[in-house]
Structure formats: structure tokens, C-alpha cells
Amino acid sequence: METKKLETGAAPRKLGDYLTRARDKAPAHADHGAGGAQSVRKDSYRDHEIEIVTTYKILVDGKKIRAPLGVDASGQVHCHSLPNYQTSSAVDMVRALIDGFPEEFERKPAPSRRRPPSSRKSRPAPAHKSKPAAKKRSKHEH
Amino acid sequence: MAVVRSNISTNPGIRDQYIEGVKLLKKEASGRTTDEFGIPGAARSVSTYDLFVVWHVTAMMIETPPGNPAQRNAAHRGPIFAPWHRVMLMVFEQNLQRVLNDATFGLPYWDWAEDGDLPPQEQSSAAIWGADCMGGEGNPVATGPFAFHASDPSAFRVRISTNISGELRSVNRGLRRAFGVSTDALPRTAHVTNALALSPYDSPDWDADTNSFRNRIEGWMNDDGVSATSMHNLVHVWIGGEMLLGSSPNDPVFFLNHCNIDRLWESWMSRNGRVYVPDMTAGADLKGHRIDDPISSPLGRSATPRETLDVSAIYEYDALA
């Protein structure tokens, strides 16, 4: 590689120009994570054409997550968002996503049933409507 | 004249220059703003250092070809892995030389296999994680030159990251590391030796399932030829935090890891010759990975894998593996 070409191309302005152009060439930004990534695997066997379409729908705490999971020809699960991982199980990948993106899985603190004594004194008790019992959280099978 | 790249753990002068250079690039405004890269929210200035974060994420999102189930992209999961990162490191090194005003500066590498040979419980206290080097772990990292201090606007901050969809997002927080959470140990010297013994640089199907040198050092397969996290990937995963994400160049250790991977590639070429596959007879499915295809970089269409095979005029390593 020519040193001159490297020196010229390494200028921050050149890198910035390149990145704004390259952004338009990244279709994955538009297609992935929009609510169900899809993998299409194709193979042939004994003159038969095989096509396997895999779509993941993932819920964590009942909420759909927008992670672009895919599966390769050998059945390994991968995800753009965690580019150095590959797992044999989508459950393991979701666990890694929970570790990698803690903010996206933060639970809102449950509303307190008991108010501190001072607030009970200073604020009138609100008129509660009766609420249905909270749904029992289903256990995930790992 | 070629600069010399050396081991950060044994060269305190280069170590200190590297830290200073990273901080200078982090403070330098690139002239770009976040909105120009499609990052939602108020437009904010992007530092020169953070352009490398954007570059890594952008390359990862360019699938080659679009929609391929192996998620082969413009920088990973295929033959282009070593040449693309070589170009990225050279561009980064040029910028460090510029801000340090030292044309002789060579990027240091972290020989992680030396630390991987230590018992697992000692690996997180290796010299590289000392307060005088990269600092330790934490959320945020609280020791070393990249420690976060909320009240200090000049402290090292992560400003661009990715969300769970892999899209760029503005953030404002400290660097994160969590050693050994998903894996308990770094790669060892034996793994390096075994990888260097593989003669094909890469081989069909040119993806994460092939038993080739490229795939082994990228880290999709273990020494037994079984899918597993190893080598380069294992280093990312062992460090954790920032290094898990597509925006992993946020951690300055990213460049030390890749400089070592580049050193291993150079070591492999010293044994096998300056050869690369696939050539241009490969099909369009491998466009972006063939020897004369342009690398996704600011260097233009003439920067190809072939151009990266001999960089002896630009840099050399103090020691090969």
C-alpha cells in the first residue's frame, strides 16, 4: 500500500465523508430489528431444493424486543447487536442481550402498596379502583 | 520509513503515548455531527475518535451480499475480516501520529495470550488493567486513564453506542467493562500456535463455519473445529461491557486487541507467503471479500485486500508470534 494514499485517506474529513456516503449502503439498518428478523437458509439434497425460513419473535417480561437474530447454515444463532457472539440456542443469545443492553431491560419500579407514614398524613388517600390480580409471570423454559 | 509496533505491556513509553493520543482524538472535533450519521436526537459534535466507532458499526451493517443468512458483512464473518481491520488500524495509527505530532509512533498491541496463560483468577489483574495502563473493570470503569467522573466534563465518555437493534444512538456515560462474566479465561498461547498451523487463509463456504486461519483467529471455531467463541471474539466477550457491542471501538482496548490479531495475520503470512483467497473468480456472493474488491474504507476503491498484504513500507512488528 502506498504511504501517500494512506496519509490522504486518513484525514478525519475523508473518513467523515466516506461514512456519510456508506450509511446509505447499509440496508440492514432499515430491515433489521423492525419486529422480527428473518433468516432464509437454502440447500439441495438428492435433487430436492430445501428452503428454511426462520423468524424469531422474542418477548422479555412480556415485551417484544427488536433484536436482529439470525441463524446460519449450521444452526448457530447470531445477532448483529452482539457481533462477537454465536450461540447454539436463541435463549442463550437473549440472555447475552440482557447482559449487553441492561438499559433496554430495566424494570420500572413496582408501585409501592404502602406509603410512608408522613405522606399518608399529608396527602388524602386516593380513591382506588379495584384492580384485577396481577398475572402470574410465566416461567421461561430454557 | 516503517514504524515499529510493540507490546504495550513491555513498552511504557508507547503505552503513555497511546493513552495521550486516544484522549486527544476523543477531544478533537471531527467537524461532523450525529445527525449526519442518522443518529436520532439533537445534533451533537462527533469527535475524531468516535468516527472510528461509527465506521465499525457501519461496516458491520453492510451485509455481503444483502440478506445472507451467515451475516457475512463488510468487515466480519468472512475473508475480509483481516484486511478490513488492517486498514482501520492504519487509519487510526495515522491519526494518532498526527495528534501526537510524532510520525514514528507505532500502534501498540496487547499479546493477550500471555495473560491467557495465567490462571483464570489472575487474568483480571494483569498489567494491562493497571491504573497506569488501560484501567480496570466496572460500570463505569473507575480506575485508569479512561475512568469516568460524572462531574468532570473532560473525563472519558462514551457518546455514541448501539441499541439492541444494532442502530447508532447518542449516549453520555462512562466506559463499561465486566471481566470474565460470559467466559472465564482469555485465549492461550496454545490456541495461537494451533491457529498459525492452519495453512489455508480461508476456505469455502467463507463463513463462520469454515476451519481456516481467518475463521480461527476471528474466533468462530475452537481448536477441535467445533463452533465456539475463541481468539478475537473471546477477547471481546471476556472483557465484556462496551466490547460486546458493535460499537466496541469505544473501548481503547479494541485497537490493542486488533493490533494483536493483525500481528498474528502477519505471523501467518511470514510462514505461508503473502497470499489471500478468494480471488476474483469467486462468485458475486463474495463481492466485498475477493482479493481485488474495494475495502469499505475512506481510502477509495484502490484499497483492496491485495493492497494490504504487504505493508512493510508503513509498519512492522517488534516480534511475530
Image: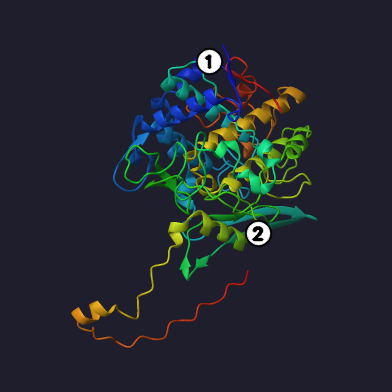
* Mark number, residue B134: none
- Circle 2 SS class: strand
Q: Is residue B204 left or right of residue A106?
A: right
Tell me the residue that label 1 is attached to.
A3
In front: B72, or B315? B315
Q: Badge 2 is on which residue?
A: A52
Q: Position of residue B297 (x, y in %)?
A: 50, 30
Looking at the image, residue A70 lies above or below residue B133 = below
For mark 1, name the chain. Answer: A
* Chain under numbered label 2: A
Q: Image quadrant of residue B77?
A: top right
Q: Residues within 10 Å of mark 1 (few under 14, many from 20)?
A: few
Three-letter code, disc 1 = Thr
Q: Amino acid at mark 2?
A: Ile
Quarter assignment of residue B260: top right
Q: Which of labels 1 and 2 is toward the front?
A: 1
B118 or B2, which lies in front?
A: B118
Judge whether B120 appears above or below B56 on screen: below
Q: Residue B2: give x, y in percent of width and height.
A: 58, 14
| Labels in figure, total | 2
